[in-house]
Amino acid sequence: MSPAGTDTDSCHFPQIPYDEVRSARIREAIRRGDFEDIAHRRFVNDLVYVEWYTRIGIAPTLRATTANGIRANVWRLAMKYPTVFDTIRRELGATTREEAFNQEDFSRWDWNGEEDPLSRRIWATRHGWEWNRVCDENAKIRQGTADRVQLSVRPAFAPFRFPELHYDDLRSDFIIEEIRRGSFDDLEYRQYVNKLVYIETWTREPTRIAFHAVPHYKPWLVCAQFPEEYDIIRRELGAPTRADFERNPPPIPAAEVESRARQHKREWLAVQEHQSPPESSLFGTRR
């Protein structure tokens, strides 16, 4: 049997027995589908994976690569099923996509919570002129100190204050149009645009974003805030969209599949016969 949290379990079988699921939204999905409908069962198992992560959390003994892989799976599911994800999390008293995003630290490794005012003004001037050039192709970019420095060595600033790519180097027509709709001086709007730029950067230069050796879950957390925009940007750049999220789990021995399928089918039918979730469970909400 595969370790908890792997694609094998979450695709073929649920992480929690169906009759121990607490979420009313998931139990409703079980009631309106047939266990033998593999596509619907996998949809339900994806939702159960979210509940499993929410209630059980990640064991502190797991290796960083495994733990971050699980987080990446969860936030990928959050992007695939944004509304349902928020419903399940809310039912279980956990953070929604937006709340979790606001609690996450997106700082670079060398960010200490302080910015150099002079450096910030220099880079604001540089990126401001890039923004203006996107709005007006005839605008000239003034030469300044920051022009001679690559973004890879740009000083650390507050997350999403500045873009991961130069604005005038963007390829997504959608992001370009969003830039033209707003002002660089509107920090809140600029941060929204910079999150979209983050998605383009991750699509074009993934190592610029996922620069650690372990699986990176934070890009999925960013993308989960903008699922529709993600699809638009990825489609423009010729990259897979949410519709292409089809996992291909490793094969499981036929005898194990048959045995576990019989057990889980009994659980599925038990949910369809009873309207209420179990009053008690071995699990508690931990995340």
Image (spheres, rainbow, N blue to C red):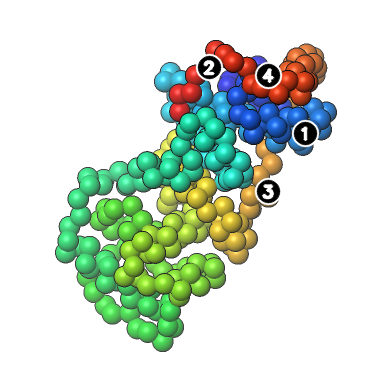
Residue drawn at x 50%, y 72% as measured from the top left: 177
Three-letter amino acid code of the residue under disc 4: Asp
**First reached walking from the N terminus: tag 4 or tag 3:** 4
> What secondary structure is marked by label 4?
helix
Q: Nearer the viewer, residue 101 or 172?
A: 101
269 with respect to 237 (left or right): right
Quarter residue 252 falls in? top right
Q: Are marks 1 and 3 in contact (CB under 8 Å)?
A: no
Residue assigned mark 1: 32
Q: Position of residue 222 (x, y in %)?
A: 47, 49
Q: Nearer the viewer, mark 4 or mark 3?
A: 4
Q: CA distance from mark 4 to mark 1?
A: 15 Å
Quarter residue 253 falls in? top right
> What secondary structure is marked by label 2?
loop
Residue assigned mark 4: 19
Q: Position of residue 238 (x, y in %)?
A: 63, 60
> What secondary structure is marked by label 3?
helix
Q: CA distance from mark 3 to mark 2?
A: 33 Å
The residue most toward the bottom is: 138
Residue assigned mark 2: 283
- Is residue 15 shown to the viewer in this render? no
Three-letter amino acid code of the residue under disc 2: Phe
Q: Are marks 4 and 3 in contact (CB under 8 Å)?
A: no
Rate crowding at label 1 as few (under 14), some (14 to 19) or many (20 or more) other CA atoms within 10 Å: few
Rate crowding at label 2 as few (under 14), some (14 to 19) or many (20 or more) other CA atoms within 10 Å: few
Residue assigned mark 3: 244
Q: CA distance from mark 4 to mark 3?
A: 30 Å
Three-letter amino acid code of the residue under disc 1: Arg
Q: CA distance from mark 2 to mark 1?
A: 25 Å
